[in-house]
Image: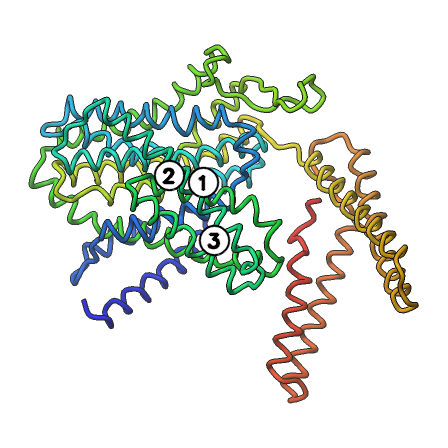
Amino acid sequence: MNYEEILLYALAAVAVIIVVHWITEKTGLPAAVLLTLTGVVYSYLPGHNVGVNKDIILMFVLPPLLYNAALDSSLLDIRRNMRTVISLSVALVLVTALLIGLGFSLWVAGATLAAGIALGAAVAPPDPVAALAVGRKAGLPGKLITLIQGEGLLNDATALTLLTVATAALEAGGEIPFGGTVLNFFRSAIGGVIIGIIIAYVVRFLRPFRQDPLSANALSIITPLGAFTLAEKFHLSGVLAVVVAGLIVGHDTPRYTTGASRLQTAAVWRLIDFFLEGAVFLLIGMQVKKIIGDLNNAYTWQQIAIALGITLGVVLLVRPLWLVVTQLLPRQLHLRLGGQQDDDMDVPEGKTKEEPLSGREVTALSWAGTRGVITLAAILTIPTDTPNYSLMVFCALVVVLVTLVAQGLTFAPLVRLLGLRANQKDKARLRNEARSAAVKAALNRLDDIQEEQHDHVEDEAIETMRRQLQFRLDRYRRRLDLLEQVESHEVPKSPQYEAALMVRQAVIDAEREELLRWRDAGRLADESLRVLNRELDHEELVLPKRPKD
């Protein structure tokens, strides 16, 4: 293809992604499924089809996706729930991949253990994006949100590290020496963690350059690519390097960057994530025609059914079995899943006491196993000359479609049926207590400033700021009093609060309309309009769409 054709395909892909996103917003259908089906339809149209370069996927798609997920995760929450996260994101992934590998090597003609484990590593990690999006809307408790998020981040690292080892074995002839494989896995994983820590501290050292929003964006974009490249250069886990770097950098971001940098960087990463995920789903759909053609030429439907049965059976059955069995294990085995106890429980200082998950929580977690973009991107990194390659890609595609449709569309009704609801009142109370504490700290800082030498102008500025802070503190206290008076777990609606939001939005709209009238009348330059509009945009940004807290 020439450059004009590449540009045309890129523009068409962007247009399709935007249209599908709009349809998703209107209908609630999974965007991943719609994009994949769009790619399938395109693959059967006359004309050139778009192929996949596994090196581009491995270098320029997976690292940014994983890094953005790491930035949005909580290092403290993962550390607090480390035992549970390791059980789900390491042990469960390894068991799933090994069972699929054994099944393929035993019952699929021509398949090796290495090829089966490579497929198992690709389909083993659930993609938490769909489950979290639905779970948050359905009011899933924070403990389960944390477990799904922590699992979804680290299981990608485990699976892709295992995939790298299995792919290396495939390229070496398909045999996996057990001792060497275990050694390579741990060497790759530990080395990747070390590289990730080094990259994170390099980024911390460069924090003076992160004050400017443009420099912060540039540094943020090259960080996952740099971490991945450096780790792979030493034959270590680039995926783990990216994840670890993202966790540490995300933890440090509130301390070492400005507000403007954080807003712009978050917006840039949302856009990158939006287009990369959409492009991967389109690409995998475009490969369906070729995959099915290869299947028809090389396999019988009985062989395809056996391969699908092994892959889907392990993916759908092992997760709930693992969740149930680990609940019965002694706590000392560090595999039993649990959650943080209530704050009033007697917990030794510095320790987090855990209790087993309830049956309802286990059921919800069992159904939060949707596979997504990581599975599709990972399966495309397997060498195309691998025996049973088309069959493996087809199995991965079916797993993604089945879990996205069957589990993704039914997860919210299941959560409501189980009665798993987050205590919204407690969340709102905690946020308002934190706001009150922040305002009190600001008032104390004003007292410190006032004790220093200053002129009359500073006195006026201090008093004006004190009145504004005191007004906010009184508002938070009234909100806390209202939260204490209600007995339900939902956030009580406050007519005064809703009225204040409505009035503030109406005022901002009026200001913006007046600025536009000035610009249209030639009294205000566009440059000045953009500056003033930006001020109003930041004011509007802090207003909730509806009263929540």
Percent across and percent down for residue 184 are: 27, 30
Alpha carbons under labels 1 and 3: distance apart: 36 Å
Q: Earlier in the sequence, mark 1 or mark 2?
A: 2
Q: Which element type, helix, strand or loop, lies under badge 3?
A: helix
In the rendering, which numbered label is found on residue 26? 3
Q: Indicate the amino acid at tag 2.
A: Gly
Q: Earlier in the sequence, mark 1 or mark 3?
A: 3
Q: Residues within 10 Å of mark 3 (few under 14, many from 20)?
A: few
Q: Residues within 10 Å of mark 2 (few under 14, many from 20)?
A: many
Residue 251, quarter of picture:
top right
How is this picture coloured? rainbow
**Residue sitting at 25 percent across and 51 percent down?**
55
Residue bearing mark 1: 244
Q: Which element type, helix, strand or loop, lies under badge 2?
A: helix
Lateral position of residue 1 relative to residue 364, left or right:
left
Percent across and percent down for residue 303 are: 13, 29
**Residue sitting at 16 percent across and 32 percent down?**
304
**Residue sitting at 59 percent across and 55 percent down?**
257
**Residue sitting at 58 percent across and 20 percent down?**
354
Disc 1, disc 2: CB below 8 Å? yes
Q: Indicate the amino acid at tag 1.
A: Val
Please tell me which residue lies in front, 66 or 107: 66
Q: Residue lying furthest right in this view?
A: 456
Residue bearing mark 2: 192
Q: Which element type, helix, strand or loop, lies under badge 1?
A: helix
